[in-house]
Structure formats: structure tokens, C-alpha cells
Image (spheres, rainbow, N blue to C red):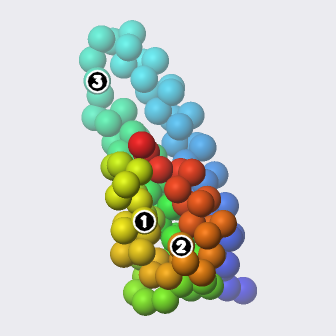
Amino acid sequence: MGSTVAGNLMFLLRKVDEGVVSVESRYRLDLDAKSVSDDLLYDVRRVIQDCQSALDWTASAVNDRYGSGRAPYFPLARRPEDFDAELDKQIKGLHANHPAIAAAFERHQPY
């Protein structure tokens, strides 16, 4: 039985949750030891990479259904005025053809 994008995302998000628990636990230990361990740094890196993968998988699924072109990365812009160009670069035509979906992507920008 093949896996689905939604199933893959749910699995990855469960792993993110597990990773956050591990980060919290290691952080407490490192705080008591007054030293940052390699294990803590690795766990933080793993959580961040898994979050980025979840965003990119989401962008790819949206692109497969509503966009055109190559498999994209999740569009991230540093400033609001850069968002439309970044979205169009990653998922061509999404803003023009599906503004509600584009608005959902914009709600999750770091600015």
C-alpha cells in the first residue's frame, strides 16, 4: 500500500512533535550542566529540517494540484513587498488563479 502526501506529512509532523519533546528535555539537562551539548544542537537542527521539509512537501502538493512547473520550495519572503514575487517564483500562477490559497501561504510568512 503506497503512502500519501497527507500521510507523509502527518508522520513528519509527529516526528517534529517528538523532536520538540527531545529538545526540551536536552535543554533542561544542558541548562543544569551550563553547557550546550552536541545532542541538543543536533535535535534542534533535526526539528528545523523536518519543519522545512513539511513546508516544502505542502508547497509541492499545492503545486501539483493548482500550480505549474517544477517542484517548488515553500515560498518564504523576508518582507511583505517581496511575497508575491517569491510565491510566483515557487508556484507560478497561484496568486492569480487561487488567491485564497495564496493568502494562506502569506499568513505563514516570517515577517
Instruction: Name the quarter where the N terminus is drawn.
Output: bottom right
Query: Is residue 31 left or right of 104 when viewed as pictured?
Result: left
Q: Is residue 63 visible?
A: no
Q: Amino acid at mark 2?
A: His
Mark 2, Cα crowd under 10 Å, few <14 / some 14-19 / many 20+, is some
Occupied quadrant, residue 37? top left
Q: Do the residues bearing badges 2 and 1 touch, measured as CB atoms within 8 Å?
A: yes
Q: Earlier in the sequence, mark 3 or mark 1?
A: 3
Mark 2–mark 1 Cα distance, whole angstroms, equals 7 Å
In the picture of the structure, the residue carrying the numbered disc 2 is 95
In the picture of the structure, the residue carrying the numbered disc 1 is 84
Q: Amino acid at mark 3?
A: Val
Q: Secondary structure at mark 2?
A: helix
Q: Residue at x 60, y 81 (%)?
A: 97
Query: Looking at the picture, how far across and down is residue 107, in whole percent?
Result: 57, 51
Mark 3–mark 1 Cα distance, whole angstroms, equals 39 Å
Judge depth for marks 2 and 3 and give the one in front: 2
Q: Residue at x 42, y 43 (%)?
A: 111
Q: Earlier in the sequence, mark 2 or mark 3?
A: 3
Q: Is residue 69 above or below residue 84?
A: below
In the picture of the structure, the residue carrying the numbered disc 3 is 36
Q: Residue furthest bottom?
A: 69
